[in-house]
Image (spheres, grey):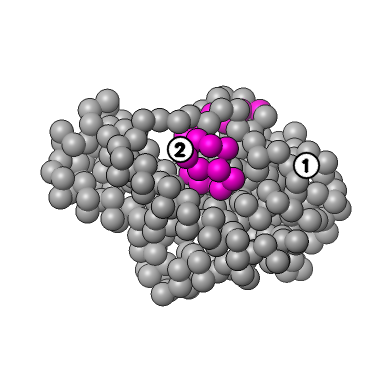
Amino acid sequence: MKITVIGAGNVGATAAFRLAEKQFARDLVLLDVVEGIPQGKGLDMFETGPVGLFDTQVVGTNDYRDTADSDIVLITAGLPRKPGMTREDLLMKNASIVRDVTDQIMTYSKNPIIIVVSNPLDIMTHVACVRSRLPRERVIGMAGVLDSARFRSFIAMELNVSMQDINACVLGGHGDAMVPVVKYTTVAGIPISQLMSAEAIERLVERTRNGGAEIVNFLKQGSAFYAPASSAVEMIESIVLDRKRVLPCAVGLDGQYGINGTFVGVPVKLGKNGVEQIFEIDLEAAELEALQKSAAIVDENCKMLEPLLA
């Protein structure tokens, strides 16, 4: 197994280090366009092996030839959000970056599974899919895993309970149009509607929608990276170990939920072949409408990129 992480910034480096510790791959490549950064971080990670008790061969590079024959590629490259900037503000700049990255990936790897973290997430996953020409089940966006983790964290804070007992379901686009599905959100199997008021739930839902912006406003420069990196690693773990985890990810839909050809966050089964099944769960009319609205926003932005991807 060979895994490549594109982008040695906070998200990429954190994900690479966690992957190295978990020993999912004998060869782990960390690539960045800035000379010295991936080499230095990669060497630092490798030198952690004797203490962390792992033997992963971490290689930092600026050369895509070192990524040849990768089984899984994690794309984190792109510009981070700044205070006051929406994910859509990043659209054109990051689309160009992800387009070029994907072209390079496919030059050296024939049939990888690509996981996208770059923002705007759903749209960048579309870009990677179009440019790679891979089947949709092999191009996946890290969306709902992070959003669900944030929702679960806020519920745990509100109720003062263990995060391990909380299951949450957040669908839709990774952004302001995400759709937290309250009826599928439980604490030890108990619907949260029985544990807190509707007002409290709506407050936590709103905080989840703005979870990324909240961290951006604290940091001033840069954006969240521990939780996004950990969420991507959870997806990779399910693929590498063929665990068949059911996780909310951004995938290209083919009629499910009345949505065609758009990448949007829904529950899927992740295994060694990537997306092995898309689950179409029962939604209330308002939730389905919100999901379709979220998909429409993604689709509208994707159409703006057609000249760039031609």
Please identify the quarter of the rendering in which residue 238 is found.
top right
Please identify the quarter of the rendering in which residue 99 is found.
bottom right
Secondary structure at badge 2 equals helix
Identify the main secondary structure in magenta.
strand
Q: Position of residue 29 (x, y in %)?
A: 74, 49
| Residue for point 42% across, 67% down | 216
The three-letter code of the residue at mark 1 reads Ser
Let me know if residue 257 is in the magenta part.
Answer: yes
| Residue contact between numbered discs 2 and 1, judged by CB atoms under 8 Å | no
Whether residue 46 sits left or right of residue 14 in the image: it is right
Compared to residue 300, the image places residue 160 above or below, namely above
The three-letter code of the residue at mark 2 reads Tyr
- According to the picture, the residue beneath numbered tag 2 turns out to be 257
Q: Quadrant of the C terminus?
A: bottom right
- According to the picture, the residue beneath numbered tag 1 turns out to be 70
Let me know if residue 99 is in the magenta part.
Answer: no
Residue segment shown in magenta: 254-272
Q: Position of residue 286 (x, y in %)?
A: 30, 44
| Residue for point 61% across, 56% down | 124
| Residue for point 66% across, 28% down | 272
